Amino acid sequence: MKTVAAALRAATQTLGAGSDTAALDAQLLLAQVSGRGRAWLLTHGDWPLTPPQARRFSALVARSARGEPLAYVRRRQAFFDRDFHVSPAVLIPRPESEQLLEQALAHTLHDFSGTVADVGTGSGALGIAFAALRPRARVILTDISPAALAVARVNARRHGVWPTFLQGDLLDPLLARGERVDLLLANLPYVRSADLPGLEISRHEPWTALDGGAEGMDLIRRLLEDLRCVSQPGALVLLEIGMQQGAEALRLARALRPRQAQVYQDLAGLDRVLRVDL
Ligand code: GLN
């Protein structure tokens, strides 16, 4: 029977061709299969795997070796220190988006009880993490994709929050219900259509979550156009943007005559967040 150490060694070798973190990837996959933590695996190298465990592990390693993102193979991704369910129906949450959430949290106190919308929520990571940390807020999650909303529902349950789920295009579901929000968060698709086919992420992640049209700004522009109709006076809006979109995003935001509009850079120094104080 194969031991933990032997299985990890073989998998690390298989994954090494396509990953810089092959040993870690192998440990995470075996943790998934065995229900044990990485620390346990590393201290129980001579533990035998059962044949079903060994088979299941091989299958996951093979998927990962073919280039499928580890988050989809494991069906989970950490975001803001929380564990989120993900499937190929949603974009995998990225650390870059954590900065947007940090700004939303910095702007609100723990007992904040306003209305918040996460538009194009996908897995729900932004809105659900916010809801968990601001338990009195009324949180609305929207997405055009029913399959994405199903993933977000799993995550809401997992994190013990009860947001409202609305299916629809951008602000349409909010407009239809006459909602007025105090805070709006969104990580909309912002990749230029022409760039998509050449990008590694577009091989596995949903194009609906990535394709932002010719300049990548189609959805951001449409959202900004309707923004005044769904926001309370003084609302705060935080949008994730692409690294070359800072100037255009600011131009569009200033057309709304807000109290303030600003672009923030991520840890790599690239434009990443548009902040509009209406
Ligand atoms: N995170 C992806 C990127 O930087 C884009 C995600 C999106 O379009 N919102 O390429």
Image (tube, rainbow, N blue to C red):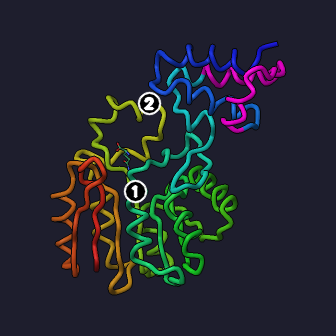
Q: CA distance from mark 2 to mark 1?
A: 19 Å
**Looking at the figure, which quarter contains the N terminus?**
top right
Is residue 50 inside the magenta stretch?
A: yes
Location of residue 170 (image quadrant): bottom left
Q: Is residue 230 left or right of residue 21?
A: left
Label 2: how many Cα within 10 Å (few below 14, some 14–19, many 20+): some
The image's mark for residue 203 is 2
Is residue 55 inside the magenta stretch?
A: yes
Q: Main secondary structure of the magenta part?
A: helix
The image's mark for residue 187 is 1
Queried on whether the Cβ of the residue with tag 1 lies below 8 angstroms from ligand 1, the answer reads: yes
Q: Is residue 239 above or below residue 267?
A: below
Location of residue 39 (image quadrant): top right
Given the image, on which type of amino acid does mark 2 rest? Answer: Arg
Is there CB contact under 8 Å for labels 2 and 1? no
| First along the sequence among labels 2 and 1 | 1
Q: Which residues are magenta?
A: 37-62
Residue shown at the point (59%, 49%) measured from the top left: 147
x and y, in percent, of residue 235 in the image: 36, 80
x and y, in percent, of residue 172 in the image: 44, 68
Residue shown at the point (54%, 58%) measured from the top left: 124
Residue shown at the point (62%, 22%) measured from the top left: 61
x and y, in percent, of residue 97 in the image: 41, 55
Residue shown at the point (45%, 63%) measured from the top left: 119
